[in-house]
Amino acid sequence: MAISVFDLFRIGIGPSSSHTVGPMRAARDFALALGDASVTRLVIRLHGSLAATGVGHGTDQAVIMGLMGEAPESIDPDTIASRLEKLEEGEPLLLANGQPISFSRHHDVQWDDTCLPFHPNAMVLSAYCDDALVATNTFYSLGGGFYVDQSKADQAKADQGEVGDDATELPYPFETAAELLALCQQHQLRISQLMLENEKAWRSEAAIREALLTIWHAMSDSIENGLRATGHLPGGLNVRRRAQLLHQQLLHPPENQRLIVSSFTVMDWVNVFALAVNEENAAGRRMVTAPTNGAAGIVPAVLAYYLKFEPDASEADVVDFLLTAGAVGILCKKNASISGAEVGCQGEVGSACAMAAAGLAEVLGGSPGQVENAAEIGLEHNLGLTCDPVGGLVQVPCIERNAIASVKAINAARMAMHGDGEHFISLDKVIRTMRDTGRDMQDKYKETSKGGLAVNAIEC
C-alpha cells in the first residue's frame, strides 16, 4: 500500500481526526452513495470508542454534517452550531443529494460502546424508506482521518491486515526504516529527497511544494489564531485558554521575571506554539492532522520553533521538514498505528514526536542515520503513553501533552545530531514495541475515558 505525506497532513477541523474528521468523511461518502434513492429516515449507530468518547469529540455532530454533504477541509466551523440548533427545532436534515428528511438526534443517533471486531472506532449508517432498509454500511475510523468501510475491512482481513487500496508504484518503496536507510545509502539521497521522488508518483514537484506550503500555512494560521483567542474551551470542563496569556508574557515580560524569561524563552516559545494549536483543536476550529488532531500541535510547534530561531531558515526547509516527518508517520502507520483508540496516545503523540524530531534533524543537516535516530528517541520515550482524556474531551491532558512532546522532539533531534547515527535500538524495533504495547494495553486506557486520568481527576 502506498501512503502519501498528504494522507498524514490533512486540513480539517477539531477536535479529533478519528472521532470527527474520519466519521464526517465516511458519512459524506455514504450520503453521496445514496444517489437518488428515496430516503425517509437515517440511523447512526456509534460503536466502541466512538460511542465511549463521541459526545466529547462531537462525533454525532460530525456525522450529521457529513450526511449533509460537508467535508472537513471545506466546512465553516462557525456554522455548525446554528445548523444543529435548527435541526433541534424541527427543521429537516438536508442530505448531500438535496433530499430533506426528518431527523432526531435523540432517536436517530444510537450509542453502543460494544467494540466491533475490526477496529474500536466503528459506526453503522443505515438509510430507510419508511420501514424498508435502503442502504447500510459499517465504517471504521483508523486515526488521522483515515477510514475504511466494511468491504475494505473484509479485504484487509483477507490480505492479512493491509488496509487501503492505493496501489501506486513508487520509485523507492519501503516498508521499514531499515529499508528506507538502505535506499538512501544506495542512491545517495537524503530522506527528504527520497520522499520527494516518491511523491512525484502522484503529482509534480511544483505541486508538491505548493501543497506542502499550503499545509504549513494552515498550521501557521492555527498557531496565530490560538495566540489571539481567549476565554474557556467548550465541553463543560471549564478549561481556560492559556496560549494568549503566555504569548503576551513572552512579548512583554513582567519586570520581575525578565531574568527567568530570558533563560527559558526558547522553550516557552515552543510551549506556546503547541498550546495555541491544540486549544484551537479543542475548540473545533480549522486544523491539520499531524498525523492526528489530538497530536496536531507537535509538528507545527517544532517547525515554528525552527523558523523563528534559525536565521537561515527558508521555505525549502519547510518542505524538507514535512517530507521527512511524513516518512516517519508512514512507518508508524504501516507497522503499528496512529490511532489512540487502537494503541493509546503513544500512537498519536508518540508518532508526532518522532515525526517532528526527524523533520528537525533533517533541516539541521542530519544524515539519514541521525534522522532515524532522532525519530527513534522521540518515539521510544513515549512508549506506553495512555489515551485517557478527562470527560472524553481533547483537552486534559492532551493540550499540555503536545507542548511537552514538542520540547521532547527538539531534545531528541539535538541528541541525535551529537551522535553519528549509530545507536542501540532501531526505529523499527521501537515501532514494533509500540504496536505490541498497544495490543497489551487495557481498553480503558485507549480513548474510552474509562481509566487513568479520566476517572481519577477530582472533577470531570
Image (tube, rainbow, N blue to C red):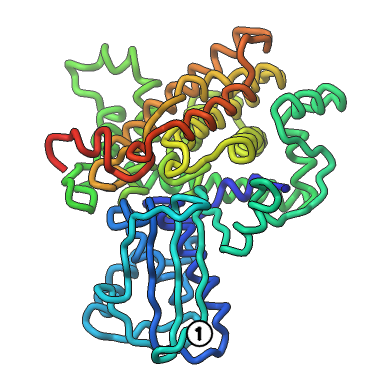
Residue 421 appears in the picture as rendered: yes
Residue 318 appears in the picture as rendered: no
Q: Could you say which is closer to the camera, residue 265 or residue 296? A: 296
Residue 396 occupies quadrant: top left
Which residue is at 25% across, 34% downward? Answer: 453
Which residue is at 50% across, 48% downward? Answer: 143
Which residue is at 49% across, 92% downward? Answer: 38
Which residue is at 36% across, 29% downward? Answer: 271
Residue on which disc 1 sits? 134
Q: Secondary structure at mark 1?
A: strand
Q: Could you say which is closer to the camera, residue 47 or residue 423? A: 47
Q: Could you say which is closer to the camera, residue 312 or residue 114? A: 114
- Residue 108 vertical placement versus 247 (above, below): below
Q: Position of residue 56 (x, y in %)?
A: 28, 53
- The answer to whether 29 appears left or right of 183 in the picture is left
Q: Position of residue 222 (x, y in %)?
A: 42, 47
Mark 1 residue type: Val
Q: Residues within 10 Å of mark 1 (few under 14, many from 20)?
A: some
From the image, which quarter does the C terminus lie in? top left
